[in-house]
Image (cartoon, grey):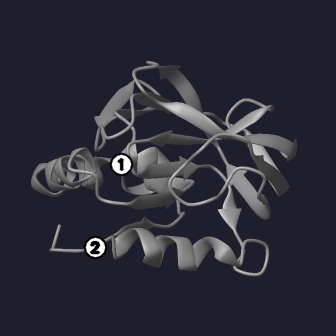
Amino acid sequence: LPLVDALYIGGGFPETQAKRLAQNESFRLSVKEAAERGLPIYAECGGFIYLGESLTIGESQYPMVGALPVTFTLEKKPQGHGYTTLAADHENPFFPVGTTITGHEFHYCRILSQREESTFTAFNVLKGTGINGHREGLSRKNILAGFTHVHALGAPQWAAAIIEKATQ
């Protein structure tokens, strides 16, 4: 990871490149070390999965970054699909409590296991699936990651919050 002040990891389908992502151990380690040092990181869907400990596809398990204490598995059917509305009800690095954001989700992965260790969910799901039908947005240290992809107009404070965190 080059020297950065903040990191945004967008969505995508890490399951299509799981082996290559897992094999890039030096990059995975550098992202984990930066997260442990408190680098502000915002990740959506595929980025969320990449920050987890592992991704299981069929009989194969691929190590991911390990910055969040969760493991993921790929399912045959979508686990979340459609528009989302989330209400921030827990302090997190990017959205003040009381903020409502809109976005969308489309993911075939689900959380297989989660260790609690200083990780919490930041949002109540008003519409959509999120992590478990009720909660969304895992947060730990300066990380906020979830299945929801925000739209800049649905969360206008999003980019400003990342820039503010990056300059602190």
Q: Is residue 102 left or right of residue 3?
A: right
User: Residue 55's mark?
Assistant: none
Q: CA distance from mark 2 to mark 1?
A: 26 Å
What residue sits 35% from the left and 48% below the top? Answer: 18
Secondary structure, mark 1, is helix
**How crowded is the residue under tag 1: few (<14 C-alpha within 10 Å), some, or many (20+)?**
many
Is 151 located above or below residue 26 in the figure?
Answer: below
Is 36 located above or below residue 24 in the figure?
Answer: above
Q: Is residue 18 left or right of residue 95?
A: left
> Which residue is at the front of the view, 77 or 114?
114
What residue sits 45% from the left and 75% below the top? Answer: 164
Residue 131 shows in the view: yes
Q: Upstream in the sequence, badge 2 or badge 1?
A: 2
State the residue position of label 1. Answer: 18
Looking at this view, name the residue that lies furthest to the right. Answer: 127
Quadrant including the C terminus: bottom left
Give the amino acid type for the residue marked by disc 2 in the picture: Asp
**Spot occupied by residue 1 in the image (x, y as percentages of width and height):** 17, 67
Secondary structure, mark 2, is loop
Q: Quadrant of residue 61?
A: top left
**Spot occupied by residue 42 in the image (x, y as percentages of width and height):** 47, 60
Give the amino acid type for the residue marked by disc 1 in the picture: Ala
Q: Is residue 41 left or right of residue 103?
A: left
**Spot occupied by residue 117 in the image (x, y as percentages of width and height):** 39, 21
**How crowded is the residue under tag 2: few (<14 C-alpha within 10 Å), some, or many (20+)?**
some
State the residue position of label 2. Answer: 5
